[in-house]
Every structure is written in structure tokens, then in C-alpha cells.
Amino acid sequence: MKQQNNKLTGADYLKATLCSAVYDVAEVTPLEKMEKISTRLKNQIFVKREDRQLVHSFKIRGAQAMIASLNEDERKCGVIAASAGNHAQGVAFSATKLGISSLIVMPLTTADIKVEAVKSFGGEVLLYGANFDEAKAKAMELAKEQKRIFIPPFDHPLVIAGQGSIAMELLQQNAKLDRIFVPVGGGGLAAGVAVLIKQIMPSIKVIAVEPADAACLKAALDAGKPVDLSRVGLFAEGVAVKRIGEETFRLCQQYIDDIITVDSDEICAAVKDLFDDVRAIAEPSGAVALAGLKKYVEQHNISGENLAHILSGANLNFHNLRYVSERCELGEKREALLAVTIPEKKGSFLKFCQLLGGRSVTEFNYRYHDEKSAYIFVGIKIAQSNEKDDIMQELTAAGYKVVDLTEDEMAKLHVRYMIGGKPCKPIQEQVYSFEFPESQGALLKFLQTLGTNWNISMFHYRSHGTDYGRVLAAFEISENSNSEFDEHLTELGYGFHNETKNPSLKLFLINQT
């Protein structure tokens, strides 16, 4: 390969992609038109169905490209990888097809369905470490000990070239594309697609899409180099990467045209769109690109274009669907969540609903407050985003006190499930949210670290099938004891935040002072 300053050129990557042996195991996946969302967004929207690969993810391409390049001696030593998901399955499947031994190191918290999938593809699994970083360190250690070849998930030229085969297919399937939206985790897919597109049809724009709470490419672009994120959200775990790769960043910085970030609710809405339109059930990371496409179209007023996005994977933890279903209407701005104070008398709910003018009430939670008033937590289905403002104005004009909770994470994650939990007597409480690792002993560690100095007056835990469980807890402590309490929490090492002043908590769960 020709190199400039020891770096592979775009032409080098084009040649590497054309020469890679991805199709020994990977399939050419369909590019399907999404009729419903095309009409809605006034653009022609196409989805690249990488969920249709045998391992239900694009990762098979990069894994195969690198493993197929190994010489005879390297193949005899076997391969090793660290992964909690799609890369693990790609490596196991590709290695087995080529008659090569594979060892996959997976974190102890990895879901059983993913462990069994790797085993079913012929891979040997070693469960090790509390997270990906610990699993990767172990894999690197074993690679040296056993002389196995380490197959990285994204930051290697051959892996990048393998992922670039998707771009070749896109151009063959629709050469009239205006923009391609690509999800970003470690950057292998985005880099591979962008470098190939720009060698052949540079007029096509390549847009990178990241979750707002795992935007390692955006952070690197802002800093001018790869940097570590202090915290990574795990909902879209397939793209939950702390640091962009060195080579993938170099290519993305050079060839990506634009970048956009999306939140979890927008991702959930995109999962629903994919199901409604083409009956695909995407994992959250698989729907990231569509979420970005929708947001980009709205922000830039795009119409009449041919837009493609990559559905990168469908290895979904089934229990995540519960969360997706609950949040998709919020992500689509089709539901407003409000806290409303109504008179405590017969007929109040009927009068309230009549005032909504036939709008659909999606949720109604009530808790007796006193003889004069009651607080209600209400969800209302809306057709357009500005309709929420109209509803609030109508309610206010009718004499109701209204608080908008639509963007209140505590209200959406905990409070809506806990209404009715106010203590029967006044107590001094401080309320905290936590992120608990989904592992044995997490609660015991929590209690042992805090000791018996503070009484727990409220505790709500909700798992969504990711590496972290969300916890809301209250403690009988006064404000002047906060510093000592926070020291104990820092020692605990879990992510935490004081939520005592959150308005939804004051309305429904704790006594107001």
C-alpha cells in the first residue's frame, strides 16, 4: 500500500476494501425504502439493513476482513477479542468459518443471550471484569501469553476497510443518494463509509450520528484529538465508547461532512419508526442513524433529497423494549407530561378532561394532597410540538396551576411510577439519584459504605437491561449534613446527584417545606 507520512491514503483504503474477503461470510444486505417516514419527512428515506447479516450486525464485515488476512502461522495461534456484544459474535463466526480458534473475553455483566450467541457461533467465552475496559485488558494479557492475534473492534485499517464494503454496496444500490447517515461508536463504520464514499462520489455528504451522552467523536473534533469522555451513557450500548480510535478519528476528521447528536428518547422514537415502516426490531445503537437523520432534516429544512441511514444491528435485549415503548412518544414529541393542581372535589377529573377538548389522556396519576386540592401527573397525546404550549395556556387560563415535566428526567424515569409515596409525617429528607452497576453485591456495597448513620426513607430501582440500573433514594438527613454524606457517596464510587430540589419530587413524593 502507498502511504503518505506513514498514513494510509484514501486510495489505499479503496484498494483494501475492494480486495478484502468480507463476502466469504458477510452478505450483501438490502437497501429498503421507508415509505411512511419518506412521506412524513418529505424526502426519500432508505435504510441499509445490516441487521440482516447472519450475526445481525455489520461487525461481521470488519472482523472477517482482518481475520481473513492472517497468514498460516497466525491462524494456527488463534484469535482473541474483547467485546460485550456484536464484535464478539462477528469474530466468533468469522473465525469458525475459517477453521480458526477464537477466544472472546466478555465482562461478567454481559447478558446471557449474547454469551450464548458467541458460543453458538463456535467461540470460546471467558467472562472477566466488571466492564469492557477490564475485559479488554485481560484479552490483551492473554493475547501475549497464548500468542493469539488480537482483533480490535474498530481501530485497525483492515477492520475499517471491511466496514467500508457497506459504502460500496450503497453506491451500487442507489447512486443518487444525497446524504448517508452513519452511527458512531469507536468510529470504524463511519470512517470506512466516509473514506470510500469520498474516493468515488465525493458529492455525497456523510453525516455522523452519536448519542449525546456518548459523543466521543464530537468531543475529539472539538479538542482536535481523541479524548476520554468522563462518562458514557449505556442505553445505546453498541456505540457507548469512551474514546474514539486514533485512526478512525483521523479519517472521520478528514472525510466526515457533519455530525449531529441525539438523545435516548429520539433513539426510542427511531426504533419505533423502523418497526412501523419495515418491521425491523433494531437495537438502540442500530436506530441511532435514523434518529440523527430525522433531527438533521428538521434542523436544516431538507426536502426532496435521497437520504440513507445504516441500521447497524439488531442484537436487542428483549427487556429493553419496555423502556423503548415508554419513551418513544416523548422522543417523537407526541406526548406531553404535566403536573396539574386540581380542586379536591367530585367531577374535577371530568371537568379537566373536558377542558382538554377531546385530546387523548395517555396517563393519569393522582395522589390526595389535602381537602382543597390534589396533584395529578398526566400524560397527553399531542400531534405537534407547539400543541403542548397551547394546552398549558388553556389550563392556566382556566385557573389550573401547571408544571411542565416533559423534559424532566426524574419525572420520566422514576416519579411517574411512584406517585402516592409521600410520608405521613414531616421528615427532613434529601433525595439522590444513582447509577448502580448491574452486578452481584452492588446493593450490599451501597449499604456497607453508607453504614447505619442515615435512614433510607425511599428507594426505587428500575433496570432497563443495560450495564447500569437507575436508583432513586431518599435519606433522613438535614441539609447541613450533606457534606459528610456526599463524602461517603464519593467513596462508594457510583454516579450520584442530589435531586431534592427537583419540582416533580416536591409535588408527588416529598413533603414541601
Image (cartoon, helix red, strand yellow):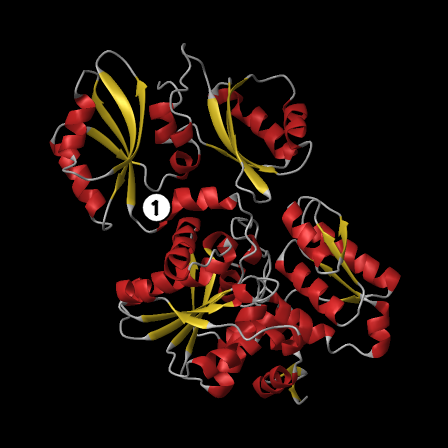
Quadrant assignment, res 161: bottom right
Please state, as top left, top right, bottom left or bottom right, where the N terminus lies in the image: bottom right
Q: Residue at x 82, y 62 (%)?
A: 143
Which residue corresponds to mark 1?
Answer: 330
Instruction: Identify the secondary structure beneath mark 1.
Output: helix
Q: Is residue 226 left or right of residue 104?
A: left
Q: Residue at x 52, y 48 (%)?
A: 235
Q: Residue furthest left?
A: 397
Q: Where in the figure is residue 200, as x and y percent of width and height?
A: 49, 87
Q: Residue furthest bottom?
A: 2
Q: Where in the figure is residue 63, as x and y percent of width and height?
A: 67, 69
Q: Is residue 153 left or right of residue 312?
A: right
Which one is nearer the viewer's eye here, 363 or 385?
363
Q: Residue at x 38, y 34 (%)?
A: 411
Classify mark 1: residues with Cα within 10 Å, few (<14), some (14-19) or many (20+).
Answer: many
Q: Amino acid at mark 1?
A: Leu
- State whether residue 152 appears in this view: no
Q: Where in the figure is residue 55, as x and y percent of width and height?
A: 61, 62
Residue 334, above or below 415: below
- State whether residue 510 appears in this view: yes
Q: Where in the figure is residue 375, as x and y percent of width and height?
A: 28, 23
Residue 511, above or below 160: above
Which one is nearer the viewer's eye here, 27 or 293?
27
Q: Is residue 273 left or right of residue 126?
A: left
